[in-house]
């Protein structure tokens, strides 16, 4: 005999001995339990006598974590009318869960008498392996009506007319229940119509007065539950036993669980899943395990066959889920993949009704950037940026965003590559208000990266003007740049031609930038040459000689080749004297102005003075200097 299948039950007997009392017990019991056993073992109705059949009672003994199953017989042989014998089997809650067919317990009852009381002082041995699970009752109609009455009125005391095989029917119903429901379920097969002593989940009475009996119209869940009572290890019973323990209100959950099982196993999978979702959405205390089951079944279906209505319903259920573990993460991946294929309106509808910040964050984390951009201005910006800072590195974001988020400030202090990506995105958006504010916020650091980005792209007059308007940052940027194109310097100088920058005491910022650039000034950058030349004439610049060297060759070449426009010549005349009417040689006039400038600034003029890279031009300057 396998010891695992052997269960020992304590028992006790109550009867009359100068009053109704406990006459025998296999173990000592605490006071509260003794009082409950005494109360429940007495006759359930007045006048209970020889004409009545025995009845059974079941109820929990919460003080000791056990269940009492009793059988009461009339005792007409005793000297006082209305006396009874009651044998009570006490089943630990842990053992209650192991018994597959509760009707086998009925075979353990033995009617007490004065001559056999000693036999009840020993525990009962029960072999669970020899229990047959099959239910052969010919009482489907009664069972269906009783099931309907019990579970449609979970908080009421149902009183039902006594039917044939009532004890076996109750045992069959009790057997179907999962452990948590079993140990809270109470019943008695003979009760008065009205009683204030104890409210059973279901009681039976042989009068014509009943309470909460269902009509002949039987619901689908009742039919399924009834059929289940006649089968062994059905899908329904396994479903009830797996998900029932997670229900906070077991009896109230029974019909919902059966309906949900039917929906999930419907021949029309799409329709069944839709029904299942409706059930869990209406179920206020639905267990998370069931939510997960419904969502997973729906998402696996949607992977095969997409249905927008079903998907939107699933989205509503998703917000109730708690995600943890690999299986739920896999489910989340499927959901997000499907969500990524939806239009922005569907995504926004889900975000609007979703109560789970975790789910929304995960959706943002895995959603494509293109989709995030489309919904960005209609949701909480900060949530998206917190999860997906990479959105800040797209020009589409800056095209649609109306404000600069605080997180931008931290990126400015990050590595240069991150800042470069950010600057490229802002500049590429052509949102000039953002660009201006961005430079104001990041100063020379942002300006430097912006100038680097402008080597090959983003050449825009508006952008140039914004950079030039921040003169103090532009000057600082020249020293941070490893290389800057002469074309870009030429574009920048156009914005400052009429307003010189401040100068450092050591070197000229523009002279440094041009010297540090690649290539030589050409005719295409003639405006830059004029700009540098004009700067040389400023009283504040510390690098007059260098500025002349950088610009003089190009100016003389342009004059000699008649490539100076009227406007450009007028710009030169802003710093050199106006030619007299008899003067005709512009080159000589410019060279004389340079000589006077050098003398004015007390710069020695000799063959070592570095104002030109052309030997011929240097010779000409020196000859002109000697004639002056």
Image (cartoon, rainbow, N blue to C red):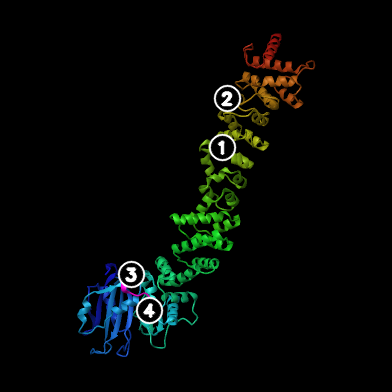
Screen quadrant of the N terminus: bottom left
Q: Is residue 492 above or below residue 190?
A: above
Q: Is residue 382 above or below residue 151?
A: above
Q: Is residue 421 above or below residue 601?
A: below
Drawn side of residue 575 relative to residue 99, left or right = right
Residue 170, numbered circle: 4
User: How far apart are labels 4 and 1 at the CA level?
Assistant: 77 Å
The answer to which image quadrant residue 571 occupies is: top right
Within-10-Å neighbours for mark 1: few <14, some 14–19, many 20+? many
Which residue sits at x=58%, y=62%?
307
Frontmost of labels 4 and 1 is 4
Screen quadrant of the C terminus: top right
Which stretch is magenta?
A: 129-134
Frontmost of labels 4 and 3 is 3
Within-10-Å neighbours for mark 2: few <14, some 14–19, many 20+? few
User: How far apart are labels 2 and 1 at the CA level?
Assistant: 28 Å
Which residue sits at x=44%, y=64%?
287
Which callout, 4 or 3, points at the residue further toward the start of the chain? 3
Frontmost of labels 3 and 2 is 3
Which callout, 3 or 2, points at the residue further toward the start of the chain? 3
Within-10-Å neighbours for mark 3: few <14, some 14–19, many 20+? few
Coordinates of residue 245 in the picture (x, y in percent)? 39, 66
Frontmost of labels 1 and 3 is 3
Q: Which residue is mark 1?
A: 420
Which callout, 4 or 1, points at the residue further toward the start of the chain? 4
Instruction: Kindly give the residue lying farthest to the front in the view shown.
Output: 1
Q: Which residue is mark 2?
A: 504
SS at badge 4: helix
User: How far apart are labels 1 and 3 at the CA level?
Assistant: 68 Å
Which callout, 1 or 3, points at the residue further toward the start of the chain? 3
Q: Which residue is mark 3?
A: 98
* Residue 305 on the magenta span: no
């Amino acid at each position: 005999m396998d010891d695992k299948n052997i269960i020992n039950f304590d028992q006790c007997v109550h009867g009359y001995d100068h009053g109704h009392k406990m006459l025998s017990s296999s173990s000592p019991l605490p006071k509260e339990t003794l009082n409950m056993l005494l109360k429940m073992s007495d006759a359930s109705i007045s006048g209970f006598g020889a004409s009545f059949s025995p009845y059974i009672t079941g109820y929990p003994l919460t003080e000791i974590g056990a269940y009492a199953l009793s059988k009461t017989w009339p005792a007409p042989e005793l000297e006082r009318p209305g006396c009874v014998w009651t044998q009570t089997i006490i089943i630990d809650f842990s053992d209650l869960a192991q018994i597959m067919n509760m009707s086998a317990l009925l075979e353990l009852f033995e009617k007490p008498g004065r001559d056999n009381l000693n036999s009840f002082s020993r525990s009962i041995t029960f072999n669970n392996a020899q229990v047959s699970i099959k239910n052969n009752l010919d009482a489907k109609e009664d069972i269906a009506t009783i099931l309907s009455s019990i579970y449609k009125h979970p908080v009421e005391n149902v009183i039902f007319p006594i039917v044939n095989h009532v004890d076996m029917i109750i045992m069959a119903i009790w057997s179907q229940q999962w452990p948590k429901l079993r140990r809270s379920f109470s019943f008695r097969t003979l009760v008065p119509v009205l009683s204030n002593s104890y409210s059973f989940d279901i009681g039976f009475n042989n009068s014509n007065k009943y309470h909460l009996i269902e009509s002949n119209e039987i619901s689908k869940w009742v039919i399924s539950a009834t059929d289940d009572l006649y089968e062994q290890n059905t899908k329904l019973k396994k479903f009830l036993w797996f998900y029932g323990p997670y229900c906070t209100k077991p009896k109230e959950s029974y019909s919902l669980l059966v309906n949900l099982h039917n929906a999930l196993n419907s021949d029309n999978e799409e329709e069944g899943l839709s029904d299942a979702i409706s059930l869990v959405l209406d179920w206020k205390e639905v267990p998370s395990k069931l939510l997960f089951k419904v969502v997973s079944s729906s998402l696996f279906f949607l992977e095969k066959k997409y249905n927008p209505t079903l998907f939107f319903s699933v989205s509503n259920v998703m917000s109730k889920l708690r995600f943890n573990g690999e299986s739920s993460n896999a489910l989340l991946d499927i959901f997000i993949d499907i969500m990524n294929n939806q239009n922005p309106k569907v995504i926004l509808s889900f975000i609007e009704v979703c109560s789970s910040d975790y789910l929304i964050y995960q959706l943002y984390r895995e959603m494509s950037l293109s989709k995030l951009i489309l919904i960005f201005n209609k949701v909480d910006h900060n949530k998206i940026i917190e999860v997906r800072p990479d959105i800040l590195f797209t020009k589409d974001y800056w095209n649609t965003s109306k404000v600069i988020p605080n997180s931008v400030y931290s990126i400015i202090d990050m590595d240069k590559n991150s800042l470069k990506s950010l600057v490229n995105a802002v500049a590429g958006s052509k949102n000039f208000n953002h660009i201006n504010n961005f430079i104001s916020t990041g100063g020379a650091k942002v300006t430097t990266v912006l100038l680097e980005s402008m080597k090959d792209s983003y050449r825009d007059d508006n952008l140039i003007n914004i950079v030039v308007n921040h003169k103090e940052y532009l000057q600082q940027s020249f020293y941070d740049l490893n290389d800057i194109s002469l074309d870009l310097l030429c574009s920048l100088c156009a914005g400052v031609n009429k307003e010189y920058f401040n100068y450092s005491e050591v070197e000229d910022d523009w002279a440094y930038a041009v010297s540090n650039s690649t290539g030589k000034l050409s005719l295409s950058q003639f405006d830059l040459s004029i700009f540098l030349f004009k700067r040389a004439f400023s009283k504040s610049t510390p690098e007059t000689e260098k500025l002349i060297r950088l610009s003089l060759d190009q100016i003389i070449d342009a004059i000699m080749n008649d490539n100076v426009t009227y406007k450009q010549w007028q710009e030169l005349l802003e710093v050199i004297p106006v030619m007299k009417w008899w003067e005709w040689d512009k080159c000589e006039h410019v060279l004389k102005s340079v000589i006077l400038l050098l003398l004015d600034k007390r710069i020695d003029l000799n063959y070592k003075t570095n104002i030109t890279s052309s030997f011929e031009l240097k010779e000409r300057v020196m000859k002109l200097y000697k004639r002056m």
